[in-house]
Image (cartoon, grey):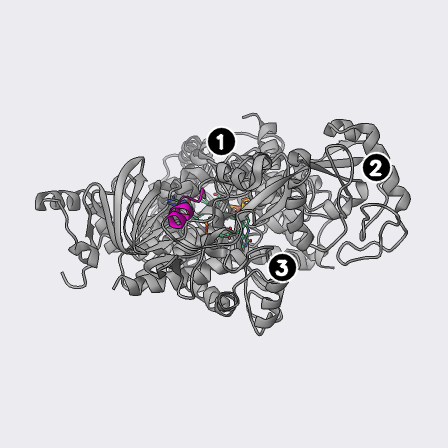
Amino acid sequence: MDGEAPAARNATFLSMAGVCQRLWDNAPLLLSSKFAWPPLFRGFAPPPAPSGVLRYGGVIGVPSLDRIRLVEETRIQSDVVVIGGGNAALCAALTARDAGRSVTVLECAPIEYRGGNSRHTRNMRCMHSAPTDVLTDAYPEDEYYADLLRVTEGLTTEHLARLVIRESPNANQWMKNQGARFQPSLGGTLHLGRTNAFFLGGGKALMNTYYQAAKKRGIQVLYNAEVTDVDIRDGRFHSGQMLLEGKPTEFRAKALVVASGGFESNLEWLEEAWGEAARNFIIRGTPYNKGKLLRLLLDNGAESVADPKQCHAVAIDGRAPKFDGGIVTRLDCVPLGIVVNKFGERFYDEGEDLWPKRYAIWGRLVAQQPDQIAYSIIDSKAMGRFMPSVFPPITANTIGELASALGLPAATVENTVKAYNATVRPGSFDHQILDDCHTEGLTPPKSHWAQAINKPPYYGYPLRPGITFTYLGVRVNEKAEVRMNGIGSSPNIFAAGEIMAGNIVGKGYLAGLGMTIGSVFGRIAGKEAARAAK
Amino acid sequence: MPPNDRIAEGERLLVICNSCRYCEGYCAVFPAMEQRLSFTPADVRYLANLCHNCAECYYACQFAPPHEFAVNVPQVFAEIRAESYKQYAWPAYVRVSGWLAATLGLVVMFLLAGSREALNANFYGIISHETMVAVFSVISGYIAMVYAMGVRRFWKESGERLPGVSAWMQAARDVFTMKNLSSSGAGCTYPDEEHSQSRRVFHHFTFYGFLLCLASTTVAAIYHFAGSVAPHPYFSAPVILGTLGGIGLLIGPVGLYALKRRRDPAIVDAQQDGTDVSFLVLLFLTSLTGLLLLALRESAAMGALLRVHLGVVLGLFLTLPYGKFVHGIYRSAALLRSAYEMARSKH
Ligand SMILES: Cc1cc2nc3c(=O)[nH]c(=O)nc-3n(C[C@H](O)[C@H](O)[C@H](O)COP(=O)(O)OP(=O)(O)OC[C@H]3O[C@@H](n4cnc5c(N)ncnc54)[C@H](O)[C@@H]3O)c2cc1C
Ligand code: HEM
Ligand code: HEM
Ligand code: SF4
Ligand code: SF4
């Protein structure tokens, strides 16, 4: 067999008869992929084999005869194993596969929920020197880096950050080459058309594209594959353990890429970092990012980066589901009214800054309030000026009734609104800019967009802290190699995505940075892992 | 579920989509949705008819089932469309079974033809021209009236005035290119998650095939009044148009049917399969019998084939007022409304 994937050379305990049986079982699939129909007529190819047929313990991956990998019942073997199934993982897997290595992706979610937080995303931030088909104007490296410095207040690693920025256009082009589609720049949403490229259909469409590309190129993807342990000695990865469909299974590889996200959906860990307040946090994305690999790597001597309390958190609708509520639970009405805590009192300047900065601080602010809850109160003038939320507002004709409906002390809320209304100075309202509508003599003040709340009906929304992703991660170098305490760089463990995002954002956030870090470092990790697995 | 539940479900999805908007680049539905903050039942029906069931927004949706938000726009909209057809139908919706209609058509034609025989493609020796014209003008007139009244109801519900020329042009472009089945050139996610142009291409065969057959019949009618009576030579306009259209109507329905058998059941309303399939079959049979008639018009089989062809055509026509065909009518009306709204919002 010429050009056989290196994995096929590995020990297999299958008898030849077993091989033949399996080939026979998979014959329909072999035929259908081998003699692929032209795209127009793809509809006529025989239906794919039931997904149960090609799990593990059989002929896996692209069933072209010279690339079949034979795997024993309880062991997975591949040149490169990628842990995770989101953007960073798939970028790494596709890149390593293109370098000629056999690749296995271990995704702990079932197929319906594959793609981690990446499936909730909408855009990525890209440097560019001239308008492109998907970006307007220009966004040069220095401006990008200056933005990053401002939000992180210096908590970044300059050479890695600049690497991400410089590589962002290449990553964007590479994604397009994989079949990823972006919205044309004209249809731009919000004010991000210049800095951010929007995925057509959002992150899940992007993930679908990647998984289709992976399938075509013979990358083995295992779902319901939860990695539970890794054997690392002297900074080198040897083997790992996982629960594959609930069954303990070993996996081996010459190189390992860890792209398994942060620990944002691990409630105990969040509580360790934040105390009891964490119980009231809502996790905006996947329930599968429990930080298992992060913990394993740290326990095995990986250097850590960023503070466990640092994360991206925003104020979202308090009625959101505990996990996976995604983008539709965000509330953007804070600057248009006032925000009170559970005692009915204001606690922060709602008009401090423009989106997206204000968006990113309110998660933290609400987290610091008693019971981690707050309420945004607006009047009819504000309706239609912010992106509609998925939950209907609580509505009433007087402030007192609204307060009662929200479960707040009516008298206090009435006083709060009265005091606020009394200090509002006339100005010309414009919610697109930092306008001159502000309060005078109020503490805390409202420095922009302050308008009296006096036009019924009145509306209220409960707010809770919504965690997007955590920053605590493993330290890496520019080759995505994980830094090991006392050893230096690991020869065969690479990290990409959320699990190392803390190298670049130690604090604060720039919209679209998460996907850019994952794409750039995913590709680097894939390339370097392919090299290490030679 | 009772009708109102479907509308309520459609509204629920629209509220979710409107606060997400990730799919805004796929089709005309999302830009139209973004013009609104809330959705009346009329809005929901309009947007459902604007949807081309391309399924992009289902596969791309992070909230698709089993997620608790259970967002499945193409399926719910398909159900709402089916309901809306009944609501718009004038004077009232009548469910016409394709098989029954075809049988009825055949019976009528065999009765009208009686035991007459004729040779040498002498069609009118079997059924007189006057009879053909009488039968088909009555039914065509009825169909036209039903459509006109249906569109009137659709439009009235929108509360819009009559759009200007540019909106009509835009809507025509959208119909003739079937833009909303192309997802900016990638093709739609039908019959499965991977992009393919197959549905659009086979729809084009069907759609243009049908138009060509209508053109052929119209030209033949004009010829008749101009004194050139059927049979027309093989290289005459009516026969060339009809043959091309006929080929389209063989390929298109077969392709659409094959895709249908492989499509993902999650994105469609399986209740409509009966209506859809009988429409596909009738289109195919109309064309097949027409082409056979053409091929064998000089033979002794002509009489029987003419009876069968006209019978099937009559059957097809009987299903038109309330059957699958109305999708084209209300989709076109919805595209017109959307073109009108979009032009206005740009000013
Ligand atoms: C609602 C929301 C919207 C967002 N919008 C944007 C945006 O518009 N732009 C942007 O740049 N960023 C956005 N982000 C942030 C962005 O999602 C992340 O930065 C990015 O997706 C990280 O990619 P990743 O591949 O590292 O992680 P993920 O995509 O989360 O992938 C991690 C994967 O690892 C798997 N996994 C975890 N543990 C294990 C284990 N033990 N074994 C096997 N597999 C495991 C998970 O199942 C998952 O598939 C958003 C996040 C959320 C929640
Ligand atoms: C209005 C009623 C119709 C009448 C009276 C009619 C009659 C005929 C006749 C007489 C022929 C034979 C022509 C020839 O051999 O020269 C024919 C052929 C044909 N008919 Fe019809 N037909 C009608 C409607 C339709 C419709 C609606 C379709 C398709 C949707 C159709 C499809 C065809 C095709 C494909 C042919 C063969 C090609 C041709 O000869 O033009 N017909 N029809
Ligand atoms: C006039 C404008 C038209 C538009 C905008 C339109 C659009 C569509 C769309 C989007 C579909 C796929 C979704 C669905 O099944 O509802 C469809 C299906 C279909 N169309 Fe049309 N159509 C039009 C006219 C026609 C015409 C004139 C014909 C042929 C006579 C036709 C035949 C069909 C058939 C047979 C199907 C069903 C395919 C299936 O069952 O899978 N359409 N049409
Ligand atoms: S279908 Fe899903 S992803 Fe698309 S706009 Fe609606 S909610 Fe968002
Ligand atoms: S199914 Fe296709 S046409 Fe219908 S709303 Fe979704 S993307 Fe638009």
Q: Nearer the viewer, mark 1 or mark 3?
A: 3
- At a point 86% along the width and 46% down the height, the residue shown is A442
| Chain of the residue under the numbered disc 3 shown in the image | A
The residue closer to the viewer here, A319 or A228, is A228
Label 1: which secondary element = loop
- Tell me which amino acid carries mark 1: Val
Quadrant where the N terminus of chain A sits is bottom left
On screen, residue A410 above or below A424: above
Q: Quadrant of residue A101?
A: bottom left
C-alpha span from label 2 to label 3: 32 Å
The residue beneath circle 2 is: A416
Q: Which residue is mark 1?
A: B96
* Quadrant of the frame with the C terminus of chain A: bottom left
Is residue A143 at least partly visible in the picture?
A: yes
Please give the chain letter of the residue carrying mark 1. Answer: B
Measured in 3D between alpha carbons, the distance from the residue under mark 2 to the one under mark 1, in whole angstroms, is 65 Å
Residue B138, located in which quarter of the rendered image? top right
Q: Amino acid at mark 3?
A: Val
Is B144 rendered above or below residue A305? above
Letter of the chain that mark 2 sits on in the rendering: A
The span picked out in magenta is A290-299
By secondary structure, the bulk of the magenta-drawn segment is best described as helix
Front residue (pair B11, A432): A432
Spot occupied by residue A284 in the image (x, y as percentages of width and height): 55, 42
Residue A394 point in image, percent of width and height: 72, 32
Residue A75 appears left or right of A432: left
Direction front: furthest residue = A486
Q: B201 above or below A378?
A: below
